[in-house]
Image (cartoon, rainbow, N blue to C red):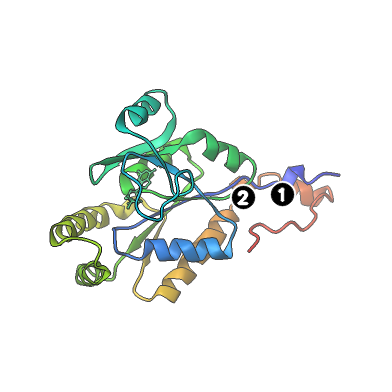
Amino acid sequence: MTNEPIRRRGLPLVVCAPSGTGKTTLIRKLRQEFPLNFSVSCTTRPPRQGETAGQDYIFLDRAEFLKKKRTGYFAEWAEVHGNFYGTPLQPVQERLNRGEDMLFDIDVQGAAQLALSLPEARFVFILPPSLEVLAQRLHSRGTDSEEAIKVRLVNAKVEIGTCHWFDAWIVNNDLEQAYAELRAFYLAAALRPSLRPGLPRAVLEGEYHGRACCRS
Ligand code: 5GP
C-alpha cells in the first residue's frame, strides 16, 4: 500500500492587488494559518531596510537579471516602478511537484504570463472599496511621496480596469471578511480534482489513508 496515488500536486496561488489595498496583510494571515510557501522573486531594486537576501528577494544587478532572462530562467518577469522582477521557474516546479502549495505576490503583467507557464495556477485580485479609500490609505501609510501616490492611483485604475480575467475578486473593505473570502478561495482551489487525479482510484482500491488536503 502506498500514499503515492493520492499525493496532491501543489497549488500555485497568485494574489494581485493595487498597492495600498491590504494584500500584504491578507497574504501574511493566510501564511500564518496554512503552510504555503512563498515564491522568492529576483529583483534589481536595492534591498530595503529589514529585508534579507534569499528570503525576501534574490537581489541581482540588471546585467545578471537580463542574463538569467535570456536563458529562460524565469517563469515570468516584469518591469515594475523602474525595476525588474522575475519568478525563478525551476524551484517553483520542484516544490509544486513535491505537493507544496506556493503563493505568488507579483504584479498583474507577471500574473498574466504565469497563467501560461503554470496553467494549474489560480488567480485572486484584491480591490479597494473605492479609489477614494485607496487614496486615503496610501496617504495614511505615509511611505510614499505625493507624486508616488499619484502614480500608484493611476496604476490602480489601469489594474482594476483589466482584472476581468482573474478567477476571484475580493473587495477589501473589512479585513476579516476579505480574509474569510481569500481562505475559502484557497481551500476550494486546493480541492480541485486536477491536483489529485488519483484520488477516486485510491478510494476504490482501499489506498486512501485520510490525508488532509490542506493542513492548517
Ligand atoms: P516591492 O518592490 O514593493 O517589493 O514590489 C513591487 C511590486 O512588484 C509589487 O506589486 C509586487 O507584487 C511585484 N513583484 C514582486 N515580485 C515580482 C515578480 O517576481 N514578478 C512580478 N511580475 N512582479 C513582482
Residue 135 picture quarter: bottom left
Percent x, y of residue 54: 48, 43
The answer to whether the residue labelled 2 contacts the one labelled 1, judged by CB atoms less than 8 Å apart, is yes
Q: Nearer the viewer, residue 167 or 23?
A: 23
Label 1 residue SS: helix
Q: Position of residue 194 (x, y in %)?
A: 59, 46
102 sits left or right of 168 in the view? right
* Residue that appears at 65% across and 60% down: 215
Image quadrant where one finds the N terminus: top right
Which residue bears the numbered disc 1?
199
Question: Looking at the picture, does residue 189 appear above or below residue 134?
Answer: above
Q: Secondary structure at mark 2?
A: helix
Q: CA distance from mark 2 to mark 1?
A: 8 Å
Kindly identify the amino acid type of the residue bearing the numbered disc 1. Leu
Instruction: Residue at 41%, 23% (x, y): give it.
Output: 71
- The answer to which quarter of the image holds residue 115 is top left
Q: Which residue is mark 2?
A: 193
- Report the residue at 30% width, 32% height from top: 62
Up/down of 132 relative to 215, above or below: below
Which is nearer the eye, 139 or 177? 139
Residue positioned 47% across, 63% down in the render:
28
Q: Is residue 38 left or right of residue 205?
A: left
Which label sits on residue 146? none
Horizontally, is 186 left or right of 113 in the view? right
Q: Amino acid at mark 2?
A: Pro
Question: Badge 1 local density, few (<14 within 10 Å), some, or many (20+)?
Answer: many
